[in-house]
Image (cartoon, coloured by chain):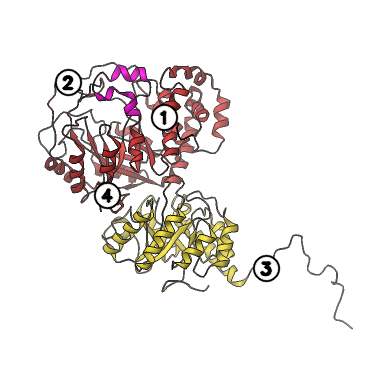
Chain colours: A red, B yellow
Amino acid sequence: MSRQTTIQTILAEKHLDQNPECWLGTLGNIKTDQVRQELSKPAGFFSFDRLLVLLSPAAEEYLEQMAQQSQRLTVQRFGKTIQLYAPLYLSNVCVNSCRYCGYNRTNAIKRTRLTIEQALADAEVIAGEGFRHLLLVSGEDRAFITTDYLIKLAEHLKRWFSSLSIEIYPMAQKDYESLFLAGIDGVTLYQETYDRRVYAQYHLAGPKADYDYRLQTPDRFASAQMRRIGLGVLLGLADWRLETLALAEHAAYLMNKYWRSQVSFSFPRIRPARCVHAQWPHLVSDKNLVQMMLALRLCFADAGMVLSTRESATFRDHVIGLCITQISAGSKTNPGGYSSAKQAVEQFEIADTRTPAQVAQMICAHGYEPVWKDWDVSFSKSC
Amino acid sequence: MKPLIIADRQFSSRLFIGTGKYASSRIMAQAIEASGTEMVTVALRRVNIDDENDNMLAAIDRNRCQLLPNTSGARDAAEAVRLSCLARAASGICWIKLEVTPDPYYLLPDGEETLKAAEVLVKDGFVVLPYINADPVLAKKLQDVGCAAVMPLASPIGSNQGLKTKASIEIIIRQASVPVIVDAGLGAPSHAAESMEMGADAVLVNTAIATSADPVQMAAAFKMAVEAGRIAFETGLPPQYAAANASSPLTGFLRDEL
């Protein structure tokens, strides 16, 4: 990879951002012999051709074999452990107009913004449940959830939590640098879809309509030294196989260029949300989602794999032993949802409604250790 | 078997144990027990070092085992030093397994930053055991700045590949004036025995025990292998020959008879 290579050029060269359908023929023509051959190679290394084979319809017959390889690889690298985290929603105000989201600015819902004190009230409940890894989430509410707000909040949260990450709107590199110094050292940002045409259809207005600014955001936060890079696509908007090819290219590019940071994949499938009535053309079945996860694991031995409470209890219970390394539990996706009796509107509906203690118990029952703390606030320069 | 001495502490077991990747603290405690170890390393990122009721810490018998906190996750010298100092302030433990691994994928150690951190920590009174690539020159430099031991890797951490760096580790052992502990990549008791036969002072094992089907049995197997390898080393292995060597092919006909 030359110094000038950007994620845009990588995607463009393989037509993954425009006309990715050109790969459907190749995927459809892959034979079971090729799958068998691919599965006989050492697992955990990425190449575009390998991923094509593992994502192919022909590989569907080999899911059990893929699952066994994936399980071995994950246990070897991450051990028999599952890390737990909780999201804390700070604001459901949003300037964007994304057709799949309950926070869409055109939706007539009651908007809620948490003051620092209110956010801390929620955080205290989360810490009381045992969590030490916290993910701060917000709509694109630049007017209220400012860099200063996050720095002040982080200052307080460091007393209770050993790791702070954010999943909010894209920021400038200097803002990410300030947040890193304040002790926030992970950023999750989903591209939602890598297909420019589909992206434009779903992101109708607001700053998020700018595909390229969003695509370059992981470069900016990785340049600001963020340790954890969270990537994902919103599954349901476009063909999952094509999205996975682009997602993997993005991950491989970031791992190579920002080799000090660790990439994680999330697998959000579209969930019902208030005021959202659209029909989704590319809903992803359980079987397809598992194939996506396994194909990525067999290409990226060291990537974190995250599964949220969007997914049902049954599905989560079955996949934790396959490749997943981190899960959330007891999540509320509405600001103030943990501590306030007044329930604000949530971003999407939760599917797994078990308490954190119940989820931890399930993890133990599977022969895994629930890990609440796997980072330390002492790593932070501000400590 | 001679005891091992690091800093001012004597160890009768030459098997050191890591605490990551176990399915539960209970299984970890049983494996530690079965291994007979007296040195257990814990990642500062995983534990609340100042809390004796911490789930993982509570499972380790601190009367029998020296707790060796490690700086897993540190990307540079500054982070490793900060982490070590805060841990010592909270726990009073001045032993540190220095790990500076800027690349989160292969977790290979950064020699330059490790040396910088070691210098600072030794001056500050820590007992420093650095995790390093099998680099004999770096091992010498770390010894010169006052590290209490060096811990070269056998192969990439967690890989179970065994002694891939054998030639370099042999040089490190030959040149060392501090104990050499082979760390990372030992995947089978035979790998541990081989390290000990070479003259390593101890080995550190985690993944091979923690992720085996029965960690307690595997810990016991490593214990025996380490002891066997050490006793063989202390006894002195017989030389190897390229060809088969019958006892006395040419002079077997001679007798002391008159």
Say which chain tag 2 marks: A
Q: Residues within 10 Å of mark 2 (few under 14, many from 20)?
A: some
Amino acid on which the number 1 mark rests in the picture: Ile
Q: Are marks 3 and 4 in contact (CB under 8 Å)?
A: no
Say which chain tag 1 marks: A
Residue B159 falls within the magenta-colored stretch: no
Q: Are marks 1 and 3 in contact (CB under 8 Å)?
A: no
Q: Residue furthest front?
A: A4
Name the residue: 19% across, 32% down: A142
Say which chain tag 3 marks: B
Residue A210 falls within the magenta-colored stretch: yes
**Mark 2, secondary structure of its residue:** loop
Q: Closer to us: mark 3 or mark 4?
A: 4
Name the residue: 24% across, 31% down: A350
Which stretch is magenta? A190-215
Lower position in the chain sequence, tag 2 or tag 4: 2
Query: Cα distance, mark 3 to mark 4?
Result: 54 Å
Lower position in the chain sequence, tag 1 or tag 4: 1
Name the residue: 23% across, 21% down: A97
Q: Which residue is mark 3?
A: B238
Q: Which residue is mark 4?
A: A162
Question: Is residue A231 shown left or right of residue A86?
Answer: right
Could one spot residue B199 in this view of the protein? no
Residue A130, x across and y down, in percent: 23, 48
Q: Which residue is mark 2?
A: A107
Query: Cα distance, mark 2 to mark 4?
Result: 36 Å
Check the image and report above or below for A247 versus A19: below
Amino acid on which the number 3 mark rests in the picture: Pro
Are labels 1 and 4 assigned to the same chain? yes
